[in-house]
């Protein structure tokens, strides 16, 4: 391995760098699966390809989706938790919505980013 990283040691911290999204017509930045895959693959310098990272992302999202549909609670430590709630709306009938709650690390990063503006 090029940088001494080995999977049996568990996840290794990578230097935090700003990920740049692409701009939409309304001027908002969007982070896509392709941007995430390129960023992760470049951090692992040849150990993981973009296609491998995309497959992992797809699998993770599929598992989270299946869990939510089965009324399970999805928790991604330090990032967020997701839960599906079923609501009855007067005009539209029953609706299902996913509720997103920030985890500690994401909340801290958001707080730091607001402080810099």
Image (cartoon, grey):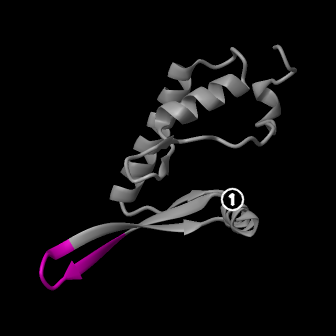
- Magenta segment: does it hold 91? yes
For the point 49% across and 28% down, the residue is 54
Disc 1 secondary structure class: loop
Q: Position of residue 1 (x, y in %)?
A: 81, 14
Q: Residue 81 is drawn in which quadrant?
A: bottom right
Residue 12 point in image, percent of width and height: 80, 36
- Quarter of the view holding residue 110: bottom right
In the image, taking residue 13 as reference, residue 61 lies left or right, namely left
Q: Please determine whether, in this image, residue 11 is positioned above or below residue 28.
A: above
The residue positioned 35% from the left and 58% from the top of the image is 70
Query: Toward which corner of the image does residue 116 lie, by quadrant?
Result: bottom right
**Quarter placement of the C terminus:** bottom right
Residue 37, above or below 84 = above
- Magenta stretch: dominant secondary structure: strand
Q: Residue furthest bottom?
A: 90
Which residue is label 1 attached to?
Answer: 78
Q: Is residue 5 magenta?
A: no
What span is colored magenta in the figure? Answer: 85-94
Please give left or right for residue 36 compared with residue 96 in the image: right
């Amino acid at each position: 391995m090029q940088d001494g990283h080995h999977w049996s040691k568990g996840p290794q911290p990578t230097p935090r760098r700003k990920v740049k999204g692409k701009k939409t017509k309304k001027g908002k930045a969007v982070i896509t699966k392709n941007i995430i895959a390129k960023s992760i693959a470049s951090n692992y310098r040849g150990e993981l390809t973009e296609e491998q990272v995309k497959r992992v992302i797809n699998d993770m999202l599929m598992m989270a989706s299946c869990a939510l549909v089965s009324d399970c609670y999805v928790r991604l430590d330090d990032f967020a938790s997701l839960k599906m709630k079923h609501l009855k709306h007067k005009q539209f009938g029953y609706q299902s919505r996913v509720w997103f709650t920030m985890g500690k690390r994401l909340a801290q990063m958001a707080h730091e980013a607001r402080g810099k503006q």
